[in-house]
Amino acid sequence: MARIFRRNPDKDKTLFWPWLLPLVVCLTLIGPCAALAVDAASAPGAQAVAADTNAPLHAAPTPATAPLDNHPWWFWPLALLGFCFILGIIAVMAGVGGGVLFVPLVSGFFPFHLDFVRGAGLLVALAGALAAGPGLLRRNFANLRLALPVALIASACAIVGAMLGLALPTNIVQTCLGAVILGIAVLLLVSKNSVRPVVTKQDAVGLALGMNGVFLEPSTGEVVEWKTHRTLLGLFFFIAIGIMAGMFGLGAGWANVPVLNLLMGVPLKVSVGTSKFLLSITDTSAAWVYLNQGCVIPLMAIPSIVGLMLGSVVGVRLLAKAKPKFIRYMVIIVLFFSGAKALMKGLGW
């Protein structure tokens, strides 16, 4: 092992750190959540409450409306592991975050309460962001001067969104989730990202915040300089993005990239890298709210994170052989279907 580190230390660090950070997060969450999971599992009728996806967290179980789940305890964690493994492969090849697929699909096809799904969805998005963050910062694809003002706004609003989402009735949140998922599908269908937007003059807000920089384009070896415009309008958009990220547990990469790239004029690679880094701040703020309210269960969160990360590794290897355009349209169709299903469930149809 010592010879490996002497021969190619950069490669080993690149492979080691992305896996260490999400592992630390998982181990940190196991302690406070394990006691909650044991208490919830031992409570009378706990399985019935978990099986009823439309019942609020404080509702008492009723045998007439909440049938018991007869599967063994390991069935659903194992199903989540396999499901998220496939989800990770698809997410990488389609160029979307795992969180935006996790919440609508798991809430639609698994018998879990929406609050638990949203809590796990935030941790899924957070784990992917922590895995990618160090490498993006090292290559200047994530810019701190661009990220920190945006993160301050988005993370504060994500806390508000998380508290709002837990306070509202489940059917209202489910209806809003379906509408947002349909909107995301339309956005993915019509948006055309610009690799290098033309910004002739930086505005006063962007100049005052120092939102500019340079990065090395690996494919051409060219040093690319960039700056922002319409910065104030973009910051207002991140208020809504933060609220939606916390309220629905989707992460926010689906909205961060279009705002940074198309509205503020940041190059596509810097937009993607900064968006991924932003998730590690925004989703952390909202995740603590769900954790404090008892909406994070290790038997849901850990299999989901592990499955998604393993699937991402396989997805990266398959990316060269697959046709990303086909995968992208397939994801859009899945989002339309899951958004419609969430909307109908929220409306009681």
Image (cartoon, helix red, strand yellow):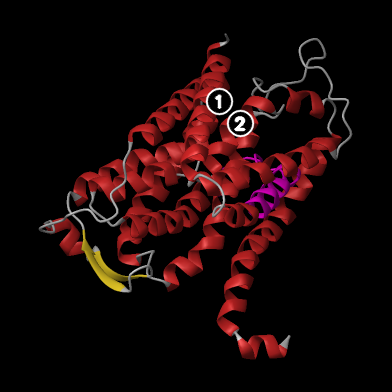
Mark carried by residue 105: 2
Q: Which amino acid does label 1 sit on?
A: Ser
**In-front residue for pair 47/234:** 234
**Residue 60 left/right relative to 197:** right
Q: In which quarter of the image is the N terminus?
A: bottom right
Q: In this view, does 104 lie above or below 160?
A: above
Would you say residue 296 sits in the magenta stretch? yes
Would you say residue 140 sits in the magenta stretch? no
**In-front residue for pair 104/281:** 104
Percent coordinates x, y for residue 6 in the rendering: 63, 91
Q: What residue type is labelled 2?
A: Leu
Q: What element carries label 2?
A: helix
**In-front residue for pair 198/80:** 198
Q: In this view, does 202 lie above or below 163?
A: below
Q: Give the range drawn in magenta.
A: 287-311
Q: Are there few (<14), some (14-19), or many (20+) residues within 10 Å of tag 2? A: many
Q: Quadrant of the C terminus?
A: top right
Mark carried by residue 338: 1
**Residue 328 left/right relative to 314:** left
